[in-house]
Image (cartoon, rainbow, N blue to C red):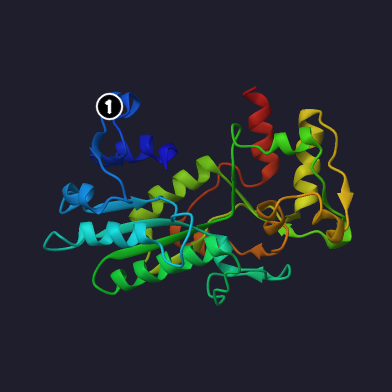
Amino acid sequence: MRRALPQLARRWRLYALVRRFEPALRLAGITQLVGDLDRPASLRRLAGIAEAVLHSAPPPGEGADDARTRRLLAALARSRSLPRRLVYISTTGVYGDCRGEVVAETRPLAAATARARRRVAAERRLRRAGCRGLRVAILRAPGIYAADRLPLERLERGDPLLKPEEDVFTNHIHAEDLARACVVALERGRPNRAYNVCDDSVLPMGEWFDKLAAAFGLPRAPRLPRAELKHRLSPPQLSFMAESRRLDNRRMKRELKLRLVYPTVDHGIAAALENR
């Protein structure tokens, strides 16, 4: 989570696991360890090197397990003890389709896609490590956006969306707020605790794209019935329209004491326009 690095650097000496050396990280004073979570032998230097870990690597693209998280924990465990704290960036896809209901962290997990099931596997493995003394905080993030991470190409292509009466609720978090959540979770996250890390926006997917279209002078996306979208969109695109939920972020505010810089997508869009 590169956006968190400046904040982390003010508090800790940083090490970054990288596949290859990056000049920007060196200039920022970050010690780089060349390794790959897909190559266990390359991870030997991780043992005993840190007391806190920010784990943001996605699972592999196939399989039922997250072998990358398994290998990371195995590498860390080669020391006499695990680090004291670990924050993992997961996804709200672990909840599956909630039919627009309000979703708190206590809701049973019901991941419906292969990628979300791999996230569930990673969470469970990390929770087991948390029972052995590692203080684990899991940040479940929804759609991450920023000025350089807006889905404007979809509007430019004219990709269709669901008609309003069939639309799904979506949730969002600005990348800068997610980075700040990582920092405070390392400091304040409770042991083996999951947090919905999202802003206060509650809106259907179509309204999100309508806001973007109005702000950036683009045509609104056409709206079609779900049955017709199956012939117009790819399976990955359709998967994001198959789940509807409204996230409860009160635990994040209460326990992590995170004050959002971008409390709604309107704030994030306004900031993106100012930076154009």
Instruction: Pick whichever, 63 or 157, lies toward us.
Output: 63
Q: Which residue is label 1 attached to?
A: 26
Q: In this view, does 113 lie to the left or right of 139?
A: right
- Helix, strand or loop at disc 1? helix
Q: Where does residue 149 sit, x and y in percent of width and height?
A: 60, 36
Amino acid type at image mark 1: Arg
Q: Is residue 77 visible?
A: yes
Side (left or right) of 98 relative to 125: right
Q: Is residue 152 left or right of residue 227?
A: left
Residue 25, image quadrant:
top left
Q: Which residue is drawn at 49% across and 52% down?
A: 258
Q: Residue at x 28, y 50 (%)?
A: 39
Mark count: 1
Relative image position of residue 237 (x, y in whole percent): 69, 51
Q: Is residue 191 visible?
A: no
- Residue 40 position in % (x across, y down): 25, 53
